[in-house]
Image: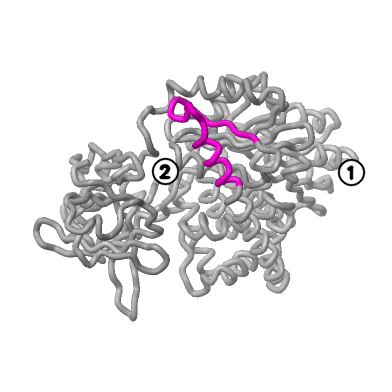
Amino acid sequence: MNKYRWVISALESGAIADFPADTRIPAAGMRLFAARAMTDATAISAFLSPRVEHAHDPFLFEHMREAVAVIDSAARSGASLLVHGDYDVDGISGAALLYHYFNGIFKTVHRFVPDRRKDGYGVADRAIDWALEQKAGLFIAVDCGTSDGARLRRLEAAGIPVIVCDHHLLPVEGDTAGILLNPVRPGESYPFESLCGTAVAYKLVQALHASGVRGSVDPSELLDLVALATVADMAALTGENRYFVRAGLERINKSPRPGLEAMRTLARLSGTPVNSRHLSFVFAPRLNAPGRIARPKPSLEILCETARDRAAQLALVLESDNDRRRELTSRVEEEAITAIKGFSDLNARGAFVLANEHWDEGVLGIAAARVVEQFGRPAILMSRNHEVLKGSGRSVPGVDLKQQLDYFHDRLLRYGGHAGAVGLSMAPDQLERFADDFSERLRPIVTPEAGMPLRIDAALEISECTIELLDFLASCEPFGSGNPQPVWMLRDVEVARETCLVGDGHLKLFVRDNAGTRASAIAFNWERPQSPEDLHGRAIDLAVTLRKHVFMGNTEVEMRVVDVRTSGG
């Protein structure tokens, strides 16, 4: 019956040291902290109330002072600046952030984001060529550049300084160029590794501001872009990232820039407080869509735009592109899943590598993520672009996909990324051998157990599902990577006969526990073989998340079902 493989925390009995006896954290909240190994009172206080002082000094980056000096010198000389982003939300937001700030420093600020189809992964040759032809005075790459040492050295050889604000892992040969600001650089002194590219660019802006190199805006006015990129890029929502996202969301809700407000209006969120979930599932897909199916320029423009009328026009472009992106993704996802189900050795494979010349390369990453969720193994999907295969891969917890690709670096034309997501290209004649060898390499690493793991944080009684608990959970926001929305387990509840399908195939569950306490829960898009009648009277365990539901002025706790299993299963 269960869709996921339940992994139940064994830590929830832990104690929180030196926590005040009169704390207002509910007992369920205490169990949540203990389950997540958060037992230090000071750390919990910082977690619940992230403040600016919890962010690190930008000058802790080893090469930050050098970067500031180079920028100051270039600005004083009247040089032009080229800011090179990337075609995803992180790269677009970072380019917009630097554009807004540097408008007050440089006489001319050019901005560039690569075309996925023309330029591929990383810094674009077109941008390098343009900078050389125009004799740019400074080149700054954000969310890319770490793996582009050879390209960037062309600029350095021509006397054009290069600064890289990135967070991607270094290439296996360690070949880098420019002044590299990257928290995962080996030997880097910055104490927090989980910054996204835009956040690294923000640290640069902070350092410039502190050094008297003042831009057209105060750095704090750019925190909305940092929040957007941090959540969209799935950076860990721990440490100073919690401050960035909290402060950025506050800014979006109080004084949104025209582009974000225009997208919010089209998404019918006007009047609704924006939270981290909206950043991830409303704003990010729309900003990513143009770069996936066409050109990313409208996404960069909407974040740079100050006129509301123009922002509204750009938002319509993003909305249309996002609708098209959904269609293309569904097609690739369906064809990939069908192909995998046809493998005779499906259960023996450590990973899936598929290619189809008809697949749109812009949606391969999203489709790969859905394949991973379906089969619980890493997946790489590729499309043919001229005489090259280009694609994206997604991983499962515990498998560092970029590190695994390092073993095959001599077979790949280009590649890079993170533990969980990569981009790559290869010659078509390498595909079959690579697919077999990659699967074989991952076979002993990927768990043989079926299904994606579902982490259960703590047990919960129906009687504990209160507004007080919801208020506590609100203080734990933002949720996302590194701080996922808590998943609770209701043990051994009996399904009542009122349970039925509602709306467009959703299961409305009515349950009662051993004490006779009743509750309801909603399982959206119930597509399992069990009918409501099959569940009547059965004892089950529920994995749920909790949300606040307001109906006709009344606030209630809504339980959303993540998974269902036979009681004790």
In this rendering, the answer to whether 353 lies above or below 473 is: above
Q: Judging from the image, what secondary structure is the residue with disc 1 in?
A: helix
Quadrant showing the C terminus: top left
Where is residue 159? Give x, y as percent: 84, 32
Q: Amino acid at mark 2?
A: Gly
Most foreground residue, 8 or 137: 8
In this rendering, the answer to whether 450 lies above or below 105 is: above
Q: Residue at x 20, y 39 (%)?
A: 14
User: Relative to residue 220, is residue 517 drawn left or right?
Assistant: left
Most foreground residue, 150 or 390: 390
Q: Which residue is mark 1?
A: 134
Q: Which residue is mark 2?
A: 482
Q: What separation in Å lies between label 1 and label 2 (alpha carbons)?
A: 43 Å
Sort mark 2 into few (<14), some (14-19) or many (20+) by Cα contacts within 10 Å.
Answer: few
Find the magenta span and give its range. Answer: 332-355
Query: Residue 411's image quarter?
Result: top right
Where is residue 323? Give x, y as percent: 62, 60
Residue 334 lies in the magenta stretch? yes
Residue 55 appears in the rendering = yes
Q: Residue at x 73, y 38 (%)?
A: 120
User: Relative to residue 476, is residue 151 drawn left or right?
Assistant: right
In this rendering, the answer to whether 142 lies above or below 342 is: below
Q: Which mark is residue 84?
A: none
Q: Amino acid at mark 1?
A: Gln
